[in-house]
Amino acid sequence: MAHTSRDADGSTPVHGRWSAFRQTPFWPATVLVLILAAAAGLFAGSYTYSMANPTPRLIPTAVVGSYEKAGAQAYLRGLEKALDTSVKVHPYETRAAAREAIEQQEVFAVFELRDDGRTAALDVSGASGSSVAELLSQTAPAVGKKLGVRVTVRDVNPLQKGDPRGLAIFYISLAAVIIGFVGAIQLSVHARSLTPFERILFTAAYALLGGFVIAATVDWLLGALNLPFAESWLILALTMFVSGMVFTMFNTLFGRWAMLPTWGLMVIIGNPSSGGAVSWPLLPSPLGTIGRWLPPGGSVNAQHTAVYFQGHQHAFPFLVLGGWALLSCTVFWVWRHRHPGGRDKDPTGAEES
């Protein structure tokens, strides 16, 4: 039996009590209490910072017609002042070319200025970002009224009826992200003895099945979105696989604390910066930039284009998802000997996340 040293008066020294405390289950429980409290604050803070008061920073906008006239320039300056942001103007020769820029997601709206800037037609795209479209639709006519410019507004690419606020894509992507790493956690707990190859294989299996169920539920069962089913299914499956392998990578590097970097990367930073709930021109600029390079942002961007801009899909979001998949699988495979699982490990050994 271990003996605890005592001071001359018979009391246990402070360092002895501290060492004894760290050997009890109260020590990890106390650490978890502090971590969970910090995580709660970070979670609330990150979502509040990015979503509670979305403010425009830079809105790429196409202009056609007599936009160089003094009246048109005065109107655009008045719009910038009212929005308290920069309206980044991209001139186009024709309305058709400007509309194509909307389809390519290069601009969020088209201003056609006529009669030396005395009248304006504003084409917004609700599918490009409902919050931006709503902001422009409210502000542009109000500024025109003050400056004597008659403004008409129409939505040339509206959201689907089952998704009037444009949040369904964010929710299905969020589901894929969360279930993706929760699935990896459950594999690490309940299928601990899987070999590295088997772990990757079963992560891919639940990702494929889970992506199918998410797409089928939202489209076939609820009718909230009319999805291009095969493409949306594969995007969701890739998202779930990436999320699961990101946890597996961190589990290899950090063991039982893997949930901390996973939650930080995918939920604290990744989801609010994805552009799914708030369009990127309304996000704080660092988040709008970082978010496109993280898995949730790649998933939202790929899914958003698949649903609302069919035929104009970009490679970048798939490169983001594929890059994270490659990175996480490579790190896991190279350092697989550090992963707590595997049939060559003692199932009663080190704790798992």
Image (cartoon, grey):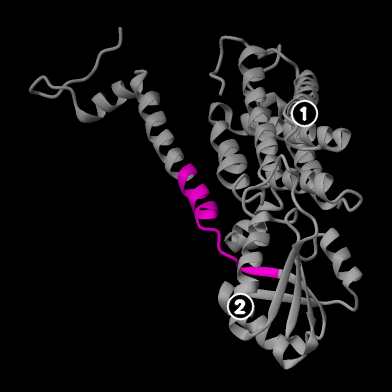
Residue 287 or residue 197, whichever sits in front:
287
Q: Which mark is residue 301?
A: none
For disc 1, the marked residue is: 211
Residue 280 or residue 334, whichever sits in front:
280
Q: Given the current orientation, which residue lies at the most extreme bottom position?
A: 70
Residue 298 horizontal/vertical position (percent): 74, 47
Q: Quadrant of residue 72?
A: bottom right
CB atoms of marks 1 and 2 within 8 Å: no
Q: Residue at 88% across / 72% down in the picture?
A: 95
For disc 2, the marked residue is: 143
Mark 1, secondary structure of its residue:
helix
Residue 322 horizontal/vertical position (percent): 81, 42
Q: Which residues are magenta?
A: 43-59
The numbered mark, 1 or 2, whose residue comes first in the sequence reads: 2
Q: Nearer the viewer, mark 1 or mark 2?
A: 2
Mark 1: few/some/many CA within 10 Å (<14, 14-19, 20+): many
Q: Residue at 67% across / 35% down in the picture?
A: 177
Residue 63 horizontal/vertical position (percent): 79, 76
| Above/below status of 135 relative to 297 | below
Q: How much space separates mark 1 and mark 2, taking CA atoms?
A: 45 Å
Which amino acid type corresponds to the residue marked 1 in the rendered image? Gly
Q: Determine whether, in the image, residue 51 is placed left or right of residue 342.
A: left
Magenta span has 238?
Answer: no
| Above/below status of 244 relative to 312 | above
